[in-house]
């Protein structure tokens, strides 16, 4: 009888401990989850502010995400949404995630900002696996090379400069590393080109509700 009682005691204590642990873990999770999403939100805001002048739009960019249209998705290879920056409901800029697949070590994830006419505002690298000290100069924290994309006009008639200098283009390659910058330049151009070819898309976005 005494043995049954002490087994029951032990089981109840174990159960209580299990419940307390589950509650503690659950509480910690919901507390840190909120903190993590706030941190992610702040990091996203910091990134957006590097790409678009924060005074040029009035909306919350994360609330105007749209699916990448099919014509563009075949070029961008990214499932991340396109974000619209609007100024009192007027289109100010568009953020387009686009991935170069031909980096030295594979995929280079980019985010490009264009104005409502399809001209480039800026480009940033979101993720890559290029070699430190060689290809990683595409990161704004490593060099100012990526700033060379700032405010570049784009037109279908004038595509010749969109390559690195070694291949006759306007963009510098890096010492000992041509593959990485070339992959970025050409992917930015492919993306701008697809948008310019589908000229109705930006016009339709300007009337986007
Ligand atoms: C270990 C190693 C890592 C390299 N990493 C890169 C890189 O990240 N990006 C890059 O453009 N080139 C890298 N290179 C150099 C390329 O192989 C290539 O020589 C260089 O980009 C010049 O290309 P090009 O011959 O088309 O001008 C690397 C080479 C070696 C041996």
Image (cartoon, rainbow, N blue to C red):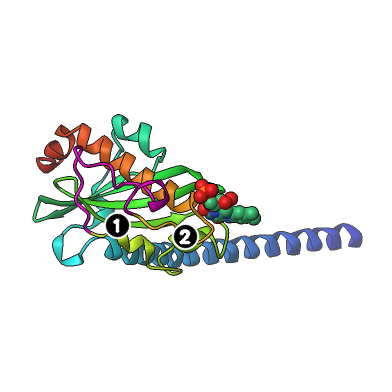
Q: Nearer the viewer, residue 77 or 205?
A: 77
- Locate residue 29 relative to residue 196 in the image: left or right: right
In primary-sequence order, the first of circles 1 and 2 is 1
Mark nearest the camera among 1 and 2 is 2
Q: Nearer the viewer, residue 22 or 128?
A: 128
Label 2 crowd (10 A; few <14 / some 14-19 / many >=20): some
The answer to whether the residues at label 1 and label 2 have Cβ atoms under 8 Å apart is no
Rendered position, 44 above or below 195: below
Task: Note whether residue 129 is visible.
Answer: no
Which picture quadrant has residue 176? bottom right
Q: Which is the main secondary structure of the residues drawn in magenta? A: loop
> Where does residue 64 sit, x and y in percent of width and height?
23, 48
Which quarter shows the C terminus?
A: top left
Q: What stretch of residues is rendered in magenta?
A: 151-170
Give the residue drawn at x 36%, y 58%.
124
Give the residue drawn at x 31%, y 43%.
189
Which residue is the site of mark 1?
149
Looking at the rendered structure, the secondary structure element under dot 1 is: helix
- Locate residue 32 relative to residue 20 in the image: left or right: left
152 is within the stretch colored magenta: yes
> Where does residue 194 sit, x and y in percent of width and height?
27, 35
Which picture quadrant has residue 79? top left
Which quarter shows the N terminus?
A: bottom right
Task: Note whether residue 162 is visible.
Answer: yes
Which residue is the site of mark 2?
174
Rendered position, 141 above or below 178: below
Looking at the rendered structure, the secondary structure element under dot 2 is: loop
> Where does residue 178 sit, x and y in percent of width and height?
48, 52
Label 1 crowd (10 A; few <14 / some 14-19 / many >=20): some
Cβ of mark 1 under 8 A from ligand 1: no
């Amino acid at each position: 009888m005494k043995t049954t009682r002490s087994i029951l005691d032990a089981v109840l204590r174990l159960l209580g401990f299990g419940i307390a642990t589950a509650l503690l873990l659950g509480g910690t999770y919901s507390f840190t989850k909120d903190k993590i999403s706030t941190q992610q939100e702040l990091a996203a805001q910091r990134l957006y502010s590097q790409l678009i002048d924060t005074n040029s739009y009035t909306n919350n960019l994360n609330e105007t995400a749209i699916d990448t249209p099919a014509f563009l998705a075949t070029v961008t290879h990214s499932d991340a949404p396109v974000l619209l920056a609007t100024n009192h409901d007027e289109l100010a800029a568009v953020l387009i995630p686009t991935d170069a697949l031909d980096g030295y070590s594979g995929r280079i994830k980019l985010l490009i900002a264009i104005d409502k006419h399809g001209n480039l505002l800026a480009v940033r690298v979101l993720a890559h696996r290029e070699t430190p000290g060689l290809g990683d100069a595409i990161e704004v924290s490593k060099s100012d090379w990526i700033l060379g994309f700032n405010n570049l006009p784009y037109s279908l008639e004038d595509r010749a400069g969109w390559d690195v200098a070694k291949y006759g283009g306007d963009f510098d390659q890096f010492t000992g590393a041509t593959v990485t910058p070339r992959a970025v330049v050409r992917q930015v151009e492919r993306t701008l080109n697809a948008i310019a070819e589908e000229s109705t898309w930006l016009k339709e976005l300007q009337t986007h509700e």
